[in-house]
Image (cartoon, rainbow, N blue to C red):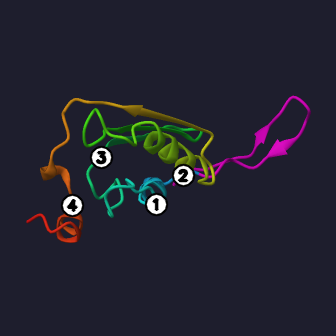
């Protein structure tokens, strides 16, 4: 079991340790973001390629879009950043849009395929 201690500041203030950011909380936050043209959240669509959580609450998300010409290319990464930043303990968020490997329908969850009638 890891012991956590409060941190001391130069002003003599003692702060409790920041809560550890949970990957499930990050996934839950990302799952609130929907592509406006598709009635399935972007996590179920398979647009999230990686989530890295560092000590100190820094979160990096690698995501893609369904196509490079996606009309939501500007807003979806910003929405992901906002949703993750709202999680308690998150101190910084970096969202990177990547194109390799290219997204295809095989990345979708079973629930997403059922919702979109893509068997």
Front-most of residues 14 and 83: 83
The residue that mark 3 highlights is 47
Confirm or deny contact between disc 4 and disc 3 (CB under 8 A). Answer: no
Disc 4 element: loop
Distance of mark 4 from mark 3, alpha carbons?
11 Å
> Residue pushed farthest right?
11
Q: Which one is earlier in the sequence, the residue at label 2 or at label 4?
A: 2
Disc 1 element: loop
Q: Position of residue 2 (x, y in %)?
A: 54, 50
Identify the residue shown where x is 51% and y is 55%.
Answer: 1
Label for residue 32? 1
- How many residues crowd mark 2 within 10 Å: few (<14), some (14–19), many (20+)? some
Identify the residue shown where x is 37% and y is 53%.
Answer: 35
Image vertical order of residue 17 relative to residue 27, above or below: above
Disc 3 element: loop
Distance of mark 4 from mark 1, alpha carbons?
16 Å
Specify start and end residues of the magenta stretch as a single range: 1-19
The residue that mark 2 highlights is 83
């Amino acid at each position: 079991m890891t012991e956590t201690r409060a941190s001391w500041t130069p002003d003599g203030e003692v702060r409790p340790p920041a809560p550890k950011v949970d990957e499930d909380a990050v996934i839950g936050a990302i799952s609130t973001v929907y592509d406006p043209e598709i009635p399935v959240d972007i996590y179920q669509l398979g647009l999230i390629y990686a989530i890295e959580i560092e000590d100190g609450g820094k979160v990096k998300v690698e995501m893609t879009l369904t196509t490079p010409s996606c009309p939501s290319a500007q807003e979806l990464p910003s929405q992901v950043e906002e949703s993750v930043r709202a999680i308690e303990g998150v101190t910084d968020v970096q969202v990177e849009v990547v194109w390799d490997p290219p997204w295809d329908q095989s990345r979708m969850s079973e629930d997403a395929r059922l919702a979109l009638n893509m068997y």
